[in-house]
Amino acid sequence: MSRDVLIRELRQIVGDRYVLTEKEDVIVYEQDASILQVMPEVVVLPADVGQVSAVVRAARRANVPIVPRGSGTGLAGGAVPAEGGIVLCLARMNRILEIDLKNRVAVVEPGVINIDVTKAVTKQGFFYAPDPSSQAACSIGGNVANNSGGPHTLAYGVTTNHVLAVEAVLDDGQAVWLGGRVADSPGYDLCGLFVGSEGTMGIVTKAAVRLMRTREAVQTLLAVFDRMEPATQTVVDITAAGIIPAALEMMDQLTIEAVEKGKPVGYPRDAAAVLLIELEGVREHTERAARLAEEICSRNGARQVRRAQSEAERQLLWKGRKEAFGALGALAPNYYVQDGVVPRSRLPEIMREVAEIGSRYRLRIANVFHAGDGNLHPNILFDMRVPGELDRVIEAGAAIVKACVAAGGSLTGEHGIGLEKKAYIGLLFNDDDLEAMARMRRAFDPDGRFNPAKVFPTPITCAEMRRQPAKIPAGLWI
Amino acid sequence: MINIPELDQCVHCGLCLNQCPTYRVLQLEPESPRGRIHLVRAVTEGRIEANERFAEHIHLCLMCRACESACPSGVRYGRIAEAARAVVGPPGSPLARALEGFVFTRLLPSPLMLRAVARLLRLYQRSGLQSMSRAFLPARLYEMTAMLPPLPDRFFTPQDEPLPARGERRAHVAMLGGCVMSLLFADINEATVRVLRRNGCDVLIPKAQGCCGALNIHNGETTMAKVMARRNIDAFLDCGAEAVIVNAAGCGAAMKEYGHLLRDDPVYAEKAARFARLVKDASEFLAALGPVAPRGRIEMTVTYQDPCHLAHGQRVRAQPRALLTAVPGLRLIEMEGSDRCCGSAGIYNLTHPEMSQELLREKMVSIATTSAEAVVAPNPGCMLQLGYGASRYGPPLPVFHLMELLDRAYGGEAPPSI
Ligand SMILES: Cc1cc2nc3c(=O)[nH]c(=O)nc-3n(C[C@H](O)[C@H](O)[C@H](O)COP(=O)(O)OP(=O)(O)OC[C@H]3O[C@@H](n4cnc5c(N)ncnc54)[C@H](O)[C@@H]3O)c2cc1C
Ligand code: SF4
Ligand code: SF4
């Protein structure tokens, strides 16, 4: 089938307005929130599952790849059409179809924005737990594909723990439901398999997600440390004491400096590290846990432990954390972020190692991360205009990834492999592992039509790939 | 295309997408802030041309700057978009462009000509011609004239004699009359002057002032805009005022950017930066001064529409609300999305009626849900648009400027529409 025939067919399916082919339209779909760019040939925005099926069938007849895209906030190049073809953007499918509070389930379309699920049920005292820092922008479909987490992952888990079932369009164009409304449906956990498949197995067209009851009480603490070591030790001790905070986040001195330079929230500028600890639950329990956490902080030599006295103060403490990545622009024109994970108990040593890697490569590294999960986000600060600096940055990044894997961890905590990290996947899996995964994928997508050249370490054949020249690593996940 | 340093600050994170009204309606990345920035960047890199299609994306932007409020990296989108518009020119057909060119470079810069046109309009409204014109004017044109409120008997005229403070003298300020405000909303300007005087301000309204040039700048016309900016700087800078008070959000936002507009002007760059620091929205100034407590009661529930160029352009959100709720008897009920554009956006409602009306319909639904008795929107563009929305889509509520209600609470004249 020729390109023109395909495009005519696509227009018949979704209407002229939602098939984009002109360069001044498709070029904006060449990139997500990473720095990798490949221009799509055509972008299609379907309105419902029927249209998705029809598009998939047309693509199959024309033998072109399909790359699903939600909001394009992914940080690993997942929504970048590495092999060209169709970008299938699900943004228009953004209806909340059903809210069933009795069974605590919401059924939503993939383009629904993460925070809108919570907004739809806040008044009734419920929320949707996975809260990526990008939650005001990212889509549920993207969250499902990347199995995204967030600051509150520590207590509530990642996306897969909150998705009961997905409706997916598979490579023959059929829509099927995987999983069921009740927890633990019999048979293989195909829903669990689909979550985290980064758009390589099919298109998510609906998701049934779990709603949770808003907690009765919440306490937020800011613990201030003069050295990094006792701060990381505190993280280890808090969880060892059996407290499961809702969130346990760390920011180091450079990050604090950046936040306070931009929109200050009152973090002490001279501290080596601060921990943001949030506890929630039943009132008495929360109070007890907060007191215990304060005690552990003090025992480890925290210079100060401040408890937010009002909702406004709590919001302010979080604001600094949530906007930290944006603020890093105040320290350096560029930064490159890693997403490695280590077992919590290894935090003190990995932080030493990250600092050591920084000095070895003569680079400043700002850390702001999900300490409770052992999910690091070292931001390597640099200036692209300094000759040779970028090379050192990429080497330092690789050294950090390797150190995490060597410490018994993983190369990405929450952002997926996509295009960006596929070269590193061999650090974690051997050829047999990869072949087993590839077979699983082929069971869903025998022709490799969906999101080709992602995740697996195959070379990219497309010659058109470029890196955003003005700003190299813009990965700013946190 | 010229070099735009602001482009480098965008890290492509997408956090601005859902705050963008045009993206919310269309869900298309080229109609989003990140998409538009990407397009402008592609033009500066020579990867695409600044052609018709590019211009369409740039023109569909409302210039509401909601994306700036959302952006954690502090990207000054407004500057990027203005630079892009300077390249593609104003929107519309060749005829519309010619008309816009005339308005920007001839009509707006000339207070005398503006007044003459306003008088003609007043005649048109009062002679009964307007009601007859429905029969022979094209529907679009008729709708346009129908959006205008009745023009007042008297226009607001600057005068070089300062009007003295009432009570203890606390500040000496100058005020911008504004082209639209002076003609369509002369009574609101008068109310603003009374409110300022009640708060202990000597108020000077320098005669040499003129239109602020905001419409020009938003539509990429910078040559005449600079002339207009320099004229205002000359009129205000050395008049001894501690602040230049503005009661139209769009004008205030533009005047606060004079420093940027004239940054390369060897004579005016420094003056412009100094002038920009003096510019204050009336509510911003009063809140900082510490307003005299109003004593008159107004038993009414209102909802507040954040003008884009006040909330996003000047980061003024809390002050107008504080002033409103300080009025005895006045209750404020927040609407959903109060800082989302109502679709007025300068001349946008004329150039892009479809998107503009879509946003207005949504806005009227949010307003209706509050069951407020009136809407407050301290900006002439929003007042016109919301007034039109109230009559076209309902609920049929009066629309007030913040200064009108304050004036009434201070015992000034009651706004005629209650
Ligand atoms: C500022 C910022 C903060 C962030 N913080 C976090 C964080 O705290 N935690 C975290 O985990 N991530 C975070 N991220 C990363 C990103 O937001 C998440 O990966 C998010 O889930 C991506 O959603 P999206 O809708 O933008 O997906 P996209 O970027 O559009 O796509 C991501 C992947 O999902 C696939 N996909 C999208 N929709 C579908 C669908 N309907 N069916 C099948 N596949 C689909 C795409 O092909 C791609 O592989 C952050 C990103 C930014 C920019
Ligand atoms: S100015 Fe308003 S319409 Fe334009 S890109 Fe920003 S948010 Fe969207
Ligand atoms: S303008 Fe700001 S919020 Fe929008 S994509 Fe760029 S950096 Fe992110």
Image (tube, coloured by chain):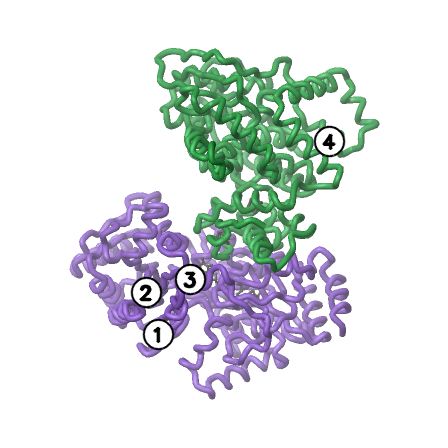
- The verdict on a common chain for dots 4 and 3 is no
Q: Tell me the mark number nearer the camera, choosing from 4 and 2.
A: 2
Residue in view at x 41 percent, y 53 percent: A326
On the rendered structure, is A278 left or right of B25?
left
Find disc 4 in the rendering and name its residue.
B143
Count the marks. 4
Disc 4 + disc 2, Cβ < 8 Å: no
Q: Are marks 4 and 1 on the same chain?
A: no
The residue that label 2 is drawn on is A363
Residue holding disc 1:
A399
Q: Is residue A430 visible?
A: yes
Q: Secondary structure at mark 2?
A: loop
Q: Which chain is green?
A: B
Amino acid at pointer 2: Leu
x and y percentages locating residue A442 in the rendered image: 58, 81
Instruction: Tell me which chain the residue with mark 2 is part of.
Output: A
Q: CA distance from mark 2 to mark 3?
A: 12 Å
Q: Are the residues flagged by discs 1 and 2 in contact, CB closer than 8 Å?
A: no
User: What's the distance in space between the residues labelled 4 and 1, CA to CA?
Assistant: 66 Å
Q: Quadrant of residue A85?
A: bottom right
Residue with the mark numbered 3: A384
> Between tags 2 and 3, which lies in front?
3
Q: Residue at x 44, y 64 (%)?
A: A473
